[in-house]
Amino acid sequence: MFSPAKYLTRAGKAFNILACAAVIAMMLLSTADVFLRLLGKPIPGTYELVGFLGTIVVSFALAFTSMEKGHIAVEILVEKLPQRAQLAIESFCNLIGALLFGVIACQAVLYALDIRKSGEVSLTLQMPPYPFIFGIAAGCALLCLLLVADFIKSVRRTIDA
């Protein structure tokens, strides 16, 4: 049987691996730049590359963080409510989150297309930023899909409770 949740989970894990690789690349690049600066030979564009890699780290880790429930949740009031109300609030939050990250993904795609059309490039490396903006869109879109799946699960749990 087709299980979209299984594929979303795999995609979230794959995106997280790419985010981890980007963190390692940022660390190695920054360390190499510091040591080479001591020798008077800094790596040109390090600041730009670290910024671009940072977009990958943040956007590609979003889905996995949501899957692992690694986000901050303030439940002081919610935990005092009946189980059905808690599940209803969880459903509502998943829906609002899905809508928000869906809008962010769409706007990021539009922005990336606009940047690509204008031919904008980074200052030092003359590197186009639009592929990284598409990466932001991909990370947000994946999170949106995961939140939709979570919304459906929590609505079912609310009805069954």
Image (cartoon, grey):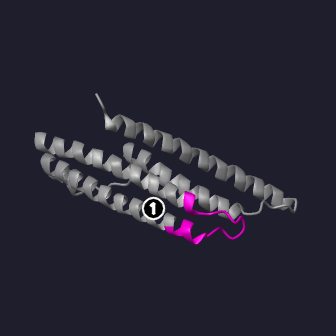
Residue in the foreground of this view, choosing between 101 and 86:
101
Residue 67 as seen in the image, left or right of residue 79: right
Please give the residue where the numbered disc 1 appears in the rendered image: 109
Q: Does 134 lie within the magenta span?
A: no
Q: Residue at x 50, y 44 (%)?
A: 16
Residue type for callout 1: Val
Which residue reaches farthest front? 117
Q: Residue at x 20, y 54 (%)?
A: 89
Does the rendering let one see residue 129?
Answer: yes
Residue in the foreground of this view, choosing between 60 and 132:
132
Q: Position of residue 107 (x, y in %)?
A: 41, 65
Q: Is residue 157 above or below residue 108?
A: above
Q: Position of residue 122 (x, y in %)?
A: 65, 68
Q: Does 125 lie within the magenta span?
A: yes
- Taken as a whole, is the magenta stretch helix, strand or loop? loop
Residue in the foreground of this view, choosing between 33 and 6:
6
Q: Residue at x 61, y 69 (%)?
A: 119
Find numbered disc 1 in the image and state the secondary structure of the residue it sits on.
Answer: helix
